[in-house]
Amino acid sequence: MSDVLNNIVNLFPLSVYISDVAEHASLKERFAAKLKELPPYKPDSRYAWTGDVKGHGFIHLDEDYKPWLDAMLPHIHRYLELLRLRTEYLDIFFQRSWPVVTKRDQVVAAHSHENAHISLVYYLEKPEHAGGLRLLMNGAPNEIIPTCSVRPPRCSPSSWNAHPSIRTTWTWI
């Protein structure tokens, strides 16, 4: 993968992998043809057309998308290696995958991928001044003592055990 730019952006506890895909030109051509087969949508809508809610949430099962899977897997492995995970002990598979078609001034509604350990976004085309990717987080996973960073007056030794359901488990891979 020497011809590919690999970069990790650490936003603790989230690590984002950014990479160019060497096969992008051929994938773009193939995807453009496949996208024309999708059902029409209302371009005047505020929200983008998202395949996961329009019956196209498993494109990884479509043989026509196999080149995309083949191109993504080395990047997934590289991401995990950069995080120092030993991928030989992992079973990597796609649960869901779908296209998103966004027109000018449209957005993808806020959502979460809670069933996935890794979420992947592949931009077929992104105009220079198009909107960006927003990462939203519920809760405050980095708090050592819950609520102390939000309401310091409540931060006292008696609040340290306020959340007995939080447990830490170490798994060495």
Image (spheres, helix red, strand yellow):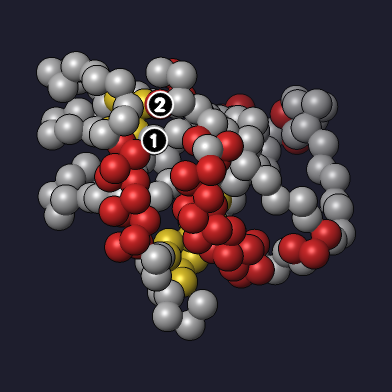
Give the number of the disc on residue 99: 1
Between 56 and 154, the one nearer to me in the picture:
56
Q: Is residue 24 left or right of residue 62?
A: left
- Tell me how far mark 1 sits from mark 2, CA to CA: 5 Å
Q: Is residue 90 left or right of residue 12?
A: right
Residue at 75% in and 25% down: 162
Residue 159, can we see it?
Answer: yes
Residue 79, can we see it?
Answer: no
Q: How packed is label 1: few (under 14 Cα within 10 Å), some, or many (20 or more)?
A: many
Asked if disc 1 and disc 2 are in contact, CB closer than 8 Å, the reply is yes
Relative to 100, residue 40 above or below: above
Kind of element beneath mark 1: loop
Relative to 112, residue 86 above or below: below
- The x, y position of residue 88, in whole percent, is 80, 64
Point out the tag, 1 or 2, that comes first from the N-terminus. Answer: 2
Give the amino acid type for the residue marked by disc 2 in the picture. Gly
The image quadrant that residue 148 belongs to is top right
- The x, y position of residue 38, in whole percent, is 32, 27
Give the amino acid type for the residue marked by disc 1 in the picture. Pro
Between 18 and 138, the one nearer to me in the picture:
18
Kind of element beneath mark 2: helix
Q: Is residue 170 left or right of residue 68?
A: right
Give the number of the disc on residue 51: 2
The image quadrant that residue 100 belongs to is top left
- The x, y position of residue 2, in whole percent, is 48, 82
Residue at 60% in and 30% down: 114
